[in-house]
Image (cartoon, grey):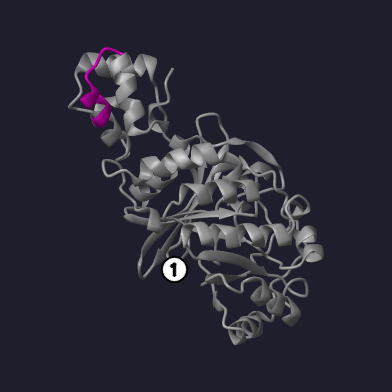
Amino acid sequence: MFDLKSMTLPELQETLQGMGEPAFRGKQIFSWLNRGAESYDEMSNLPLALRERLKAECPFTVPQAARKQISEKDGTIKYLWRLADGNCIESVLMRYHHGNTVCISSQVGCSMACFFCASTIAGKVRDLTPGEMLDQVLFTQKDSGAEISNIVLMGIGEPMNNLDNVLKFLEIVNHPDGMNIGMRHISLSTCGVISGIKRLAELELQLTLSVSLHAPDNPTRSRLMPVNRAYGVDALFAACHAYFQKTGRRISFEYAMIDGVNDHDWQADLIANRLKGMPSHVNLIPLNEVDERPFRPSRRTAAFQKRLESHGVTATVRRSLGSDIDAACGQLRRKAQKGEDS
């Protein structure tokens, strides 16, 4: 059994040649799979005998939309996709003036245990394959009718802990014979897995690295994000500075504003100090409340932004999309796990 959808074009060509077929068949199949074909029967330029052989030897599946929520306010769509093994993941389509962005998951569940996030409550189940990541982009586009121009890997899971599959997905979705989404239109998020940041720096990809910071001091960040106990704030910022020096790419820092926890002026001052010498962007995120968590949205977001800007730090407040649906990462999946109605 071969997972053709998770293969790069050279891998597909090699596989088809190994089956006694010409290499160009691999390119034909790659094109079909990357336009959202749902069966080999759709691949009309393949010989019938080959299609029947592929059905038997290389079956593929497509995700099923188990639930779908559409915001009446801004058209944001949240999907709960059911995979072939019955597990569910989330994707979100967000509409901006510069194009349509899809936020995709990289794992089923998450092991990072960030205390304000719904994705991690039930832990990690497994990694997603490159094909399962690709499907989220393809079938969000196909179902919604909205052409996807941007991808953010900020859904369920820690991409750096599934980096081999993530990198293969990026190669596939970036390919001119595939969806051809440029690296500069892709953002890869991490909660601070330094080994992954270092590996990504060596590759010098033209994507945007997005670091989920959420606190600039060790006591607060360790309380919110257990990963900080393995990779402390000093080591994290050192890795970020090294990443910039190697790639020349500006880093985006995600910062969920939590009332009375990480929204103090001294924390804004500390962020500014740690970012000296490194062009960056701080994205302040109004907190999405999670029923199982005690945190509430900050009332000081505007003041915190002004404080950062007083130090010359570029800071913006993320526009709240999908506020009338289960917008926070993991909420829709969590409801499904508990058997609640959407």
**Side of 37 where 70 appears, left or right:** right
| Left or right side of 340 for 67 | left
Q: Is residue 224 magenta?
A: no
Give the amino acid at mark 1.
Answer: Asp
Q: Is residue 63 visible?
A: no
52 vs 126, nearest the viewer: 126
Q: Is residue 29 among what the camera can see?
A: yes
Q: Is 166 left, or right, of 146 in this rendering?
A: right
**Residue at the image point whose x is 32% and y is 30% from the top:** 10
Query: Toward which corner of the image does residue 207 lie, by quadrant?
Result: bottom left
Residue range of the region highlighted in magenta in the rendering: 19-27
User: Whole-percent x and y of residue 119?
Assistant: 65, 50
Closest to the observer, 34 or 39: 34
Residue at image location 39% in from the left, 22% down from the top: 59
Residue at (40%, 47%) from the top-left corner?
Answer: 137
The residue labelled by disc 1 is 74
